[in-house]
Amino acid sequence: MDTALGPPAQMAEQADDLTPMMAQYFELCDRYDDALVLFQVGDFYEAFCGAAERVARLCEITLTQRTDSTGEYPMAGIPIDNAESYIETLLDAGYRVAVADQVEDPDEVSGVVERAVTRIVTPGTLTEAELLGGADNNYVAALAAGERYGLALVDISTGDCYATSVGSETAVADELSRFGPAEAIVGPDVDVDEESVFGAACLVTGYDAAAFERERAEGRIQRYFGPPERLLAGDAERRACGALLAYAEYTRGSSGAVGPDGEPVDPDVDPEGTLDYLNHLTRYDPREYMLLDAVAVESLELFERRSVRGHENRTLVDTLDETACALGRRELTDWLRRPLLDEARIDARHEAVDALTRDPATRERLHDLLTEVYDLERLISRVSRGRANARDLRSLASTLAVVPDVRETLADADVDARLLADLHATLDPLTETREEIEAAIRPDPPQQVTEGGVIREGYDGELDDLRSTERSGKEWIADLEASERERTGIDSLKVGHNSVHGYYIEVTNANLDSVPEDYQRRQTLKNSERFYTPELKEREEEILRAETAADDVEYDIFCAVRDDVAAEAERVQALADRLARLDVLVAFAEVAARHDYCRPTVGGEGIDIERGRHPVVERTEAAFVPNDTHLGSGPVEEADGGETDPFFAVITGPNMSGKSTYMRQVALVCLLAQAGSFVPAASADLPVLDRVFTRVGASDDIAGGRSTFMIEMSELSTILSAATEDSLVLLDEVGRGTSTADGLAIARAVTEFLHDDVGAYTLFATHHHDLTDAAADLAGVANRHFETSREDGRVVFDHELAPGAAAASYGVEVAEMAGVPDAVVDRSRDLLERTGDADTGETSDRETVAGATRTNGHVEGAAVERAVERDIARTLRETDVATMTPIEALNTLAALADRVD
Ligand code: ADP
């Protein structure tokens, strides 16, 4: 990152000559020299000199000149009111932003107003609602190396903390892709580049190496979470976690925080460690969850779309998102990101979903109640950091008010599910907290907490007295106009107020003679004079005194209430967690009921799915064709009438026939089941999968300097080395980026290895038709293909999976459908028939027929028929009926009839 953010060096050096305000600015620039300082001046955040030029350019705002006693220099200001969008622009450009707010009231100080950095905004530590994309989590990660790698993650906006240890760089990358952190800090012993960590895309920020030292790290963990040895396994894990907390403190400006260079930053605000809401750490072992690496997360489109197909696919998480509140949405993402391995836990979720599916009234009632739940995690995080306003507290209270109803609904429902019973028993309504907020804070308070209007009447005697003094003073003034008109006889007399001179009595020049003695001159205008009386002045001062005092009392009460709420952070978080889980269970049930999902069983041998569907594609495809899957689940009948028990299917069929959709749907059904959801199928008996591997499509990593083929091979090598017999492997074509012979050889060897040595459940879609021979040689391999039929000479995709291998690749037909000129299509057909498959790797009818006779007589007949049809069509096309004699026509017709026979 560009470090030349501050003022030109010579300017900083002449600090003695600077105005006090500029000296303060440069001092902050110096202290936060790795960030871009935005410096509050009234209603704007300003940047000066070099930084101003940069801010002006990036944010597209006007660069102005500031002139003071020391000279003229550039200045750029962004309005505080919508600072967040500008800050986002600066973050996008790779800067950290240090926000320096005025921490004194400008009206109360005579000299320069004191400013302090109140927060440092980095991509991973955003917490303002405006900047965070909706309900999703925003993680920052820390990584330390030791015997194993220690990885810690925190979402500062919600307080979610995770820590784990993993054994390899790949596993680090896998965990990072699960969470998708916006930013990572790494220990001195970890060597990564700036934009990725062992292959997982992630912005890497430099941070103080000392924060990763064991002792310091453990001290911090102790302070936030308790004894490190009880909580965290392994040295690296503790160091990562401690450093992460240090970084969180740094970005929050907490006391004792150190900056990236290890120097203490010593902010003047928030002297307490205001990260109290970080009080719960989830230590997890990746082995407790189904492993989904970056490739799988991407190719299954769990959270982000791949636009390769050109049409708008939704993601899995969007498709299932019937959650009612932001808490639930984040929990749903978390469940999909970390499907369970523990059968009992999986079953408990299914049981709850089952109960809710069967009880629509309860489900709807719960959903309605949950829509009234605000983002408790973010609210309590703001409360703990002292950034919550009165509206936040009211939102929190109104959420708490929902809890008794939720409990009642759960109690009334005749549901017999352990998880729901647990939730009913443990949902904590925090009644005293809610009552305190409701008693103290007005129902619709203003945004500002320092200007009154926040605290309810009747809550505090002193405050009520002050307000009543203020009110009676104002009433007296309101009556003054009438009484003075009467006293003086001046009908045009007016009482008014302005911010400079306060209250006044205005008399036009024509009436000045009637002004009484006790009127004292305040201000002279063109046509009138303004006066005050000693009594008016006294009243005015009284009002002002009472008003200021009342505002202060209100602010103090507000802070006291906020502190009381902050003290309950842990309970609020526990509640948030439970509401989040309930929301996901209700959402799963809603999806299941609305889209006809079934309850799967998990933990058996083999994948046995009847009429499975792709949860995302079925929503956009008007007539989605369901398909079965039987892998390692017992004998199935093959096309030739024989029986097999395959755990490995070679899938053939033309492009667009549905191969990738089918393979993904199998993976998604398993994943959903292990996440606790019902699944889109008529029935599903599933094993517990330890991991889903995908090798689908070509993802070019040109920037990373790897060819498509290279990527394909490295993905493949991960699969071959890491898959187990409990894994599901999806291979969508292997060896395309090389010669046909090479490609086929690799595909065949991979098949044998997965079959003989690994035994993983495998679906292998391929155009290498020769690979279908494997079924004959390997007991666990079977051929499956997608049917196609013809209508009016065109190929129609049935999307129906059938036993046996496909007859042909239909490449030429698809080319024709796509509008390739007739001449080329015809010539392709000629070549195909003459040369067969030898050079292209694709399959000719003749070869298919030869190959297919081994497995499937039906296929042979179909292929011959197609060849004949094609022949007849060609003859007809070449025939010029207009110039034919009747005899010629008859002969041609007879020849065609012969062919058909
Ligand atoms: P392939 O991998 O064989 O090229 P895809 O799986 O990408 O084919 O499917 C192509 C298109 O066909 C999909 O985008 C989808 O719209 C449609 N499709 C796939 N499977 C089905 C199905 N079972 N029922 C209905 N339409 C489907």
Image (cartoon, rainbow, N blue to C red):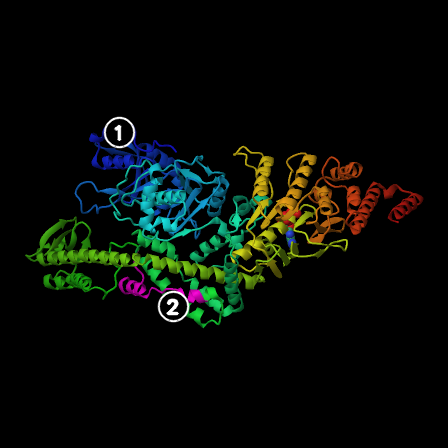
**Residue at x 34% of width, y 48% of height:** 221
Q: Nearer the viewer, residue 153 or 313?
A: 153
Residue 324 visible at all? no
Q: Is residue 29 above or below residue 424?
A: above
* Residue 317 within the segment the image draws in magenta: no
Q: Quadrant of the N terminus?
A: top left
Q: Amino acid at mark 2?
A: Pro
Whole-angstrom CA distance, mark 2 to mark 1, is 62 Å
Please state the horizontal and vertical placement of residue 411, each as a whole percent of the image: 43, 71
Q: Is mark 2 within 8 Å of ligand 1?
A: no
Please state the horizontal and vertical placement of residue 737, each as a whole percent of the image: 64, 36
Q: Is mark 1 within 8 Å of ligand 1?
A: no
Please state the horizontal and vertical placement of residue 717, each as a whole percent of the image: 58, 39
In the picture as drawn, the residue positioned furthest to the right comes out as 887
Proximity of marks 2 and 1: CB atoms separated by less than 8 Å: no
**N-term-proximal mark, 2 vs 1:** 1
Q: Nearer the viewer, residue 682 or 462?
A: 682
**Residue at x 45% of width, y 55% of height:** 331
* Residue 438 within the segment the image draws in magenta: yes
Give the number of the disc on residue 11: 1
Numbered disc 1: secondary structure: helix
Label 2 crowding class (10 Å Cα cut-off): few <14, some 14-19, many 20+? some
Label 1 crowding class (10 Å Cα cut-off): few <14, some 14-19, many 20+? some
Numbered disc 2: secondary structure: helix
Q: Is residue 895 left or right of residue 75?
A: right
**Residue at x 45% of width, y 67% of height:** 421
Q: Nearer the viewer, residue 295 or 149?
A: 149
Tell me which segment is drawn in magenta: 421-446
Residue linked to disc 2: 404
Q: Is residue 219 left or right of residue 746?
A: left
Give the number of the disc on residue 246: none
Q: Amino acid at mark 1?
A: Met
